[in-house]
Structure formats: structure tokens, C-alpha cells
Image (cartoon, rainbow, N blue to C red):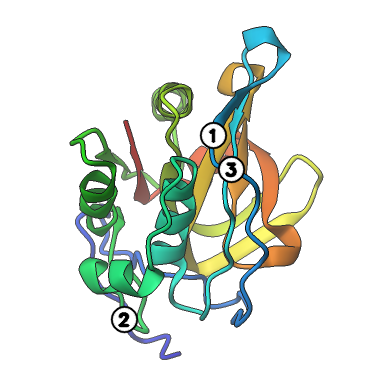
Amino acid sequence: MRTDLIRKTALTTAGIAATGIGIAAPAIAAHADAKPAAQAERKGGGHGERELNVRYEAQPNFFYCGPAATRNALSVQGKDINVDAMAKEMGTTEAGTNSINDITPVLNKETGKNVYRSVEISTNKADDKQTDKLQADIVRTVDDGRAVVANIAGTATDTDGNTHSFEGGHYISVIGYRDGGKVVTIADSADPNMASYRMSVDNLADWIATRGYSAN
């Protein structure tokens, strides 16, 4: 991986790279076992908690996080799209997938509706307004039976205290929420041993900062 391959993206104000899988993450050759049927589950009688079933697959190489995150996101709707085909549509190379603007059209094409849009968090750290919008967007998208795809960079800590570091950039899927969206569930294609984890929406918003996400 050539770390000097930094490309500008429309979703950054400072020309920060929005490349694919974090350079620190391992290359994963084997796919995880698919999980059962992709359909929405409402938990706790609708008390601010919902999670979608994802047919998870790990990414097959270090730069396919964009296609893999999109594939996992679409799997909650029962779709099984070939990651190579999506990578071609997104223009993914060994430098990664350029920005969330390359993900959104593929999500819209595969869902058959022009429902996804790219949302930018252009600042170095998300403010309250940006975080509140992210929370509302996740709740609305998941309640609609769809997953959010986010372009993240840097290091963030999940609710179990584990750190996830992708200094070179990465894409993840957000497949659920609890506490009215204050905590979200992430499907991460980088490592099948940590395929899913929860994170506060505040930490996620800061993780997305300088980049963007795709939601309803």
C-alpha cells in the first residue's frame, strides 16, 4: 500500500484523503459466515432501540472497505451484491474509495429508490448540531429498514472500551441503535473477530469528522 496516494475528496475542506480501508487494518482473505435472514428487528417494544440483521462478510483485501461496507449495508434488505462489481462502480483502487459521494449512487442504484444522500461533517470535530443530525439520520434510516454507510478516519473507542484505529481512512456500516440513537451498532468489515460493536453517537460523529456518511 502506498501511503503517499492521498486523493482529494469533495467531502473534505482541507483536502484530507477519504481513501478506503484503514492502512493499519489487516488484510482479510476469508469471509465470515453469513448471518441469518436480513430483516429488521424491533426490540424492547419500540423503546428507542432497533437493530437490523446483517449478512456480514469481511472485506477480501485491505482496500475494499468501501464496497464491503456497502455490501453489508445492502444485505439488511436481503440483497447480496458482488463486491468486485461494486468496487468497479465506485472506482475503488488500492488507494481505496475516494469519498462517500462514490458510495451513495451505488446504494441508490441497488435499492431502486433515490433515497440515500451524502451528508458532510466538514469540521475536524463534530459539533452538537452535526451530532444531533447524525443521530436523527441513523434513527430514521434504520427505522426505514436500511443501514447507514460512513466514511471514518482516526481512532475511536466503543462502548466496551476497545479502540478502533484507521488512520488511513475506512468505511463502516451502521445497522442499529439504542437509547434513541445515543448508542449505535456498527458492522465493520475489517476484522471478522470484531465484526460488530457499539459506539456512542458522539464518538461516531467525531470519527466521521472531515468526511461524511450516506443515509436516508
Give the alpha-carbon distance from disc 3 to disc 1, as whole Å. 6 Å
Q: Closest to the observer: 182 or 73?
A: 73
Quarter of the image for the C terminus: give it: top left
Mark 3: secondary structure: loop
- Name the residue located 32 percent from the left edge and 64 percent from the top edge: 16
State the SS at label 1. Answer: loop
Q: Is residue 8 above or below residue 207?
A: below
- Closest to the camera, between mark 2 and mark 3, is 3
Q: Nearer the viewer, residue 38 or 132?
A: 38
Q: Nearer the viewer, mark 2 or mark 1?
A: 1
Q: Residues within 10 Å of mark 1 (few under 14, many from 20)?
A: some
- Of 26 and 14, the residue lying toward us: 26
Q: x, y percentage for residue 164?
A: 66, 59
Circle 3 packing at 10 Å, graded few (<14), some (14-19), many (20+), is some
| Residue 137, position as x, y percentages in the image | 40, 26
The N terminus - image quarter: bottom left
Could you tell me the amino acid type at mark 3? Answer: Ala
Residue type pointed to by label 2: Thr
Q: Which residue is mark 1?
A: 39
Tags 2 and 1 touching, CB below 8 Å: no
| Marked residue nearer the N-terminal end (2 or 3) | 3
Residue highlighted by disc 2: 93
Q: Residue shown at 40%/63% (left/top)?
A: 66
Q: Residue at x 45, y 37 (%)?
A: 126
Q: How many marks?
A: 3
Q: Is residue 78 left or right of residue 213?
A: right
Query: Which is nearer the eye, 10 or 125?
Result: 10
Indicate whether 133 appears above or below 60. Answer: above
Residue 185 placed where, x, y %? 62, 39
Point out residue 152 in the picture as x, y percentages from the top left corner: 47, 55
One can see residue 47 in this view: no
Check disc 3 and report the residue beneath it. Answer: 37
